[in-house]
Image (spheres, rainbow, N blue to C red):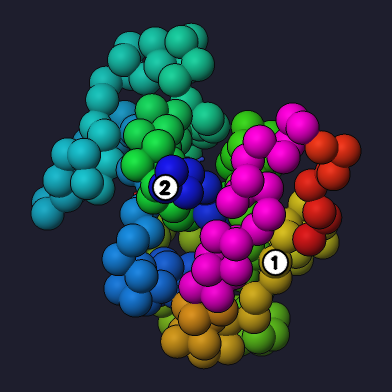
Amino acid sequence: MPLRGVPIVVTGPSGVGKGTVIAEMMRRDPGVVHSVSMTTRPARPGETEGVSYFFVDRPRFEDAIRRHELVEWAEVYGNYYGTPLAFLEENFNAGRDVVLDIDLQGASAVRAHFEDAILIYLLPPSLESLKERLVNRPRGDGDDIDLRLSEACTEMRMIGMFHYALVNDDVGRAAQAIQHIIHADRHRLQRVYPSLRENSLLGRPKV
Ligand code: 5GP
């Protein structure tokens, strides 16, 4: 039987370079797919339905919330965003691991939903380097760098629920470390022999 896929959550403070690291990791490991969120925000030029997002209207999204079709959801700048359970399940059943690029609250919800989720927190090499990245990247109107930094500090104090912490001092190295985590997890005893969960007294190892 093929190994069932698992969720791989990658979280980190705004500006840590999560998107770049995930893109590099996926370039190296085509077996991993990226979660596709549902959103009420209109598609931007170049975005594709079912690839960038599942674009829906508010009544459809609210219906999805009521029907428990979303593992987690949030309202960001007046639009709804959420992670559809069906997309994840289809991929897990096909043996594909799914990477989710979500915030701390989303990570917590995924962890509560899937006991085999792998939670990775990406850290900046230093607060100075994070500030530098926030200052140098294109900014939206409402972006307040001091606020982002203080949010990052608060968030980084709450990383106890994650299994792994990686410092993003080099994109290639961070991407490779995520690959190693994924590859090691494919040999985790309870994943290779899922029935052990019901039939033995072994608990899930705390990593
Ligand atoms: P954008 O509109 O620029 O694509 O995304 C805006 C924000 O929504 C980003 O901070 C992004 O991380 C967040 N977001 C995208 N998809 C999801 C999702 O499925 N769940 C949650 N909680 N946030 C999401």
Disc with the residue nearer the chain's start (1 vs 2):
2
In this picture, is 129 found above or below 193? below
Q: Which residue is mark 1?
A: 164
Under tag 2, what secondary structure? loop
The reply, left or right, for residue 196 in relation to residue 144 is right
Q: Residues within 10 Å of mark 2 (few under 14, many from 20)?
A: few
Q: Residues within 10 Å of mark 1 (few under 14, many from 20)?
A: some
Residue, far right: 201
**Displayed quadrant of residue 177:** bottom right
Query: Mark 2 belongs to which amino acid?
Result: Pro
Q: Which span of residues is magenta-colored?
A: 178-199
Nearest the viewer among 6 and 11 is 6
Under tag 1, what secondary structure? strand
Q: Quadrant of the N terminus?
A: top left
Tell me what residue is drawn at x 73 percent, y 60 percent.
163
- Residue 114 x, y percent position in the rendering: 62, 37
Query: Mark 1 belongs to which amino acid?
Result: Tyr
The mark lying in front, picked from 1 and 2, is 2
**Prevalent SS, magenta region:** helix
Nearest the viewer among 196 and 29 is 196
Tell me what residue is drawn at x 54 percent, y 32 percent.
72
Q: Is residue 45 visible?
A: yes
In this picture, is 203 found above or below 16? above
Q: Which residue is mark 2?
A: 2
- Residue 137 x, y percent position in the rendering: 41, 76
Between the residue at mark 1 and the residue at mark 2, the CA separation in whole angstroms equals: 25 Å
**Displayed quadrant of residue 93:** top left
The reply, left or right, for residue 94 in relation to residue 9 is left
Tell me what residue is drawn at x 84 percent, y 44 percent.
203
